[in-house]
Image (tube, helix red, strand yellow):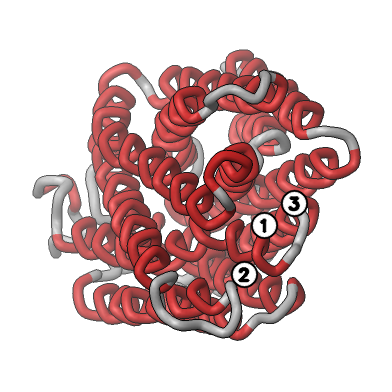
Amino acid sequence: MSEAENPGTRGWLNRTVLGAGLTSALGDFCYETTTVILPGFLAVLGIPAAVLGLIEGTADAIASFTKMFSGYIADKFGHRKTLVIVGYALTPVGQALIALAVGWPLILLGRIVSWFGKGLRGPLRDAIIVQAIAPETRGRAFGFHRAMDSLGAIAGPLLGVALLGWAQTLPWDSADEPFRLVFWLTLIPGLLAVLAFLTLVRDPEHTPNPAMKFISTLKGLPARFKRYLAAVGIFGMGDFSHALLILAATQLLTPSMGVVQAAQVAGLLYVGRNTVQVIASWPVGALADRFGARPVLIVGYALGVLTAILTALVFATGNGDKIVLLAGIFFIAGLYVAVQEALEATVTAGMVEERTLATGYGALGTVNGAAKFFSSAAVGILWTAVSPQFGFGLAALLMAAGTLALIRLR
């Protein structure tokens, strides 16, 4: 029996897990750099918060539905690695479109292309990781992978903020051109991610299921898993894109700092969030292996509720110094995202049969993305039409309802 066929004969930190982690780090280096400066770019172009919410929500929705079909296709035909490589290749294409944008339509298209690629690769990469490790080490393996993912999300924004500061010193004809330079530079790590996955990751043998039918496969997923997806979906309806957190920090700090410096500080706060996520991801996975993934996931969901409540409160406070409260919000956000991203996949692996694992991950991604489309769009629209307090307050209520549903799951 080969190493790929018997993952229990070796440690969890193998070539495939390492390769997938490095690829994710480079991929996040690419598109998280855009995430951290995109709100400032939109502010310079005069595009309101409601549009950012719709852009991020639409991108999430595209990614989610792509995950469903990519997982099904992989389970049916057995092709995974090629689709993952294509998914990573689409990210720099989307970045290039954003760099060329003069208004929101091309920005929307660029985010759709990037997140289509993210949706294409996500379930298949996770299925490859699961089949390369022993079941009792899933928490640690996914914790490591998410930590590497977030490591790129730290390095990219840090360099992006630094490059944006440097670019401001160059002679430009308009305020948006320094942002465009940073977008173009993100193509380098995006292309390196494709190369890393191509050369390092080994896809364990996977038997095709040519007779598999899409609807019947979805109906055949375990009932308990469907109840779990319902809890994830309710929570996700409040789990707004953290690009809105960056925009919140940018707006709250602009009166005292100016828009460019505020965008830089907001970017550094997001880097802090990602740093917390890196540090917490592996310990979270180890705790899940020891005490069970669902109880730890419940704690993470509760921290998500707290993040939304505090964000609503920071808008409700006076005009004093908000940097400390904002730093606390980004810190808590890093903790709950570390739990969520490591353990939603871990819980799924324990509920779904191996032959439909990619489909299960696709269903998880679809539920998450569709819910986040609602959340990001709703928070952005309510922010503009009513108040940011109202938008983030509604998010907190929905996240709390999802947490209670997960608690009730037996």
Asked which secondary structure carries label 3, the reply is: helix
Inter-mark Cα distance, 1 to 2: 8 Å
- Please name the residue shown 76% across and 27% down the image: 389
| Residue 270 relative to residue 240: left or right | left
**Residue 91's spot in the image, x, y percent?**
49, 75
**Residue 92's spot in the image, x, y percent?**
46, 79
User: Where does label 3 land, which residue?
Assistant: 49
**Residue 387's spot in the image, x, y percent?**
82, 33
- Please name the residue shown 23% across and 49% down the image: 133
Is mark 1 in CB contact (under 8 Å) with mark 2? yes
Of the pair 77 and 328, the residue shown nearer to us: 328
- Whichever of callouts 2 and 3 sits on the residue coming sooner in the sequence is 3
Of the pair 168 and 34, the residue shown nearer to us: 168
| Residue 274 relative to residue 54: left or right | left
- Disc 1 versus disc 3: nearer the observer: 3
User: Where does label 2 land, which residue?
Assistant: 111
Amino acid type, mark 1: Glu
Inter-mark Cα distance, 2 to 3: 16 Å
Q: Quadrant of the N terminus?
A: bottom left
